Image (cartoon, rainbow, N blue to C red):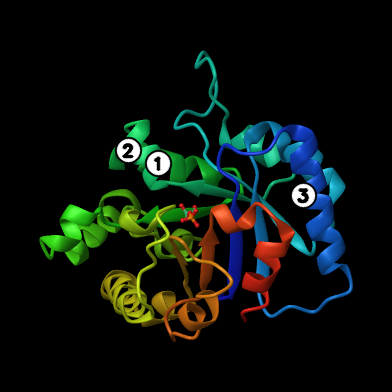
Amino acid sequence: MRKNIVAGNWKMNKTLQEGVALATELNEALKNKTVNCDVIIAPPFIHLASVVNAIDTEKIGVSAQNCADKPEGAYTGEVSAKMVASTGAKYVIIGHSERRTYYHETPEILKEKVLLALANGLTPIFCIGEVLAEREADKHFEVVKSQIEQSLFNLSKEDFGKLILAYEPVWAIGTGKTATAAQAQEMHAFIRKTVADKYGKDTAEDLSVLYGGSCNASNAKELFANPDVDGGLIGGASLSVDKFMPIIEAF
Ligand SMILES: O=C[C@H](O)COP(=O)(O)O
């Protein structure tokens, strides 16, 4: 079902102690509050179980930032979707541009990760988005469509309906350069239409599509006010409760 969602991707930040402290502080801040969105945090793998134990997971969902493209076995250093699920985490970010760029994750690899996440009961938060050169060449719609087609259009309608998508223009990530509300709305509407053409209007209307890229307390309200923007995937501004709470409260 389509929901408003604010998700914080901590990336490679915070020691275990700092991460548990941040999660605990957020939990306190949300304790007696009614908010108009689901809240998710995505700490590093090694924090997952401790964070799950430190918070009320009915109020804050926990996500991994990645999972392996293999179910189990001799893959040194990898963490499987099954292991992620065993910590109590319910979500996993897949296809973040940092994984695509720095770790050379291809559409085929991402396709496997999505299948394994779903098979283990995790909700994938699947990231898509163009780099600056692609936007400047007016190829951003084509690029985003092909990212969706290549890694997700093998899914059944039922499985596709379990996904969350996150549109993150790569040029806006960590740069302080946010997409305008109009640019975000235009792309989110395009994403929904792409999904509708393949799976039908009902699936597209039920899908939550988040925006990510320098989203913060000052621009969240304007971004989230768009009809096709269902929330945000927040990096830098999710690393302190003072910065993250106003984004949650932008709904
Ligand atoms: O996953 C989060 C995004 O990459 C956005 O990061 P940012 O808010 O630091 O730009």
Residue type, numbered disc 3:
Leu
Residue type, numbered disc 1:
Glu
Q: Is residue 180 above or below residue 238?
A: below
Q: Ligand 1: does it lie within 8 Å of the C-beta at label 1? A: yes
Asked if residue 114 shows in the view, the reply is yes
Q: Which residue is mark 2?
A: 101
Image position of 152 (left or right of 21): left
Q: Is residue 119 above or below residue 163?
A: above
Q: Secondary structure at mark 2?
A: helix
Image coords of residue 126 (percent x, y) = 44, 54
- Quadrant of the rendered structure where residue 241 is? bottom right
Q: Secondary structure at mark 3?
A: helix
Check whether the beta carbons of the residues at disc 1 and disc 3 lie within 8 A of each other.
no
Q: Which mark is residue 172?
A: none
Q: Ligand 1: does it lie within 8 Å of the C-beta at label 2? A: no
Q: Estimate the spatial distance between the alpha carbons at disc 1 and disc 3, rounded to whole Å.
A: 23 Å
Q: Which residue is mark 3?
A: 22
Q: Which residue is mark 1?
A: 98
- Callout in the foreground (1, 3): 3
Residue at x 49%, y 86% (from the top left corner) = 225
Image position of 67 (left or right of 55): left
Q: Secondary structure at mark 1?
A: helix
Residue at x 65%, y 51% (from the top left corner) = 239
- Quarter of the figure that contains the N terminus: bottom right
Residue at x 66%, y 63% (from the top left corner) = 244
Check whether the beta carbons of the residues at disc 2 and disc 1 lie within 8 A of each other.
yes
Residue type, numbered disc 2:
Thr
Which of disc 3 and disc 1 is earlier in sequence?
3
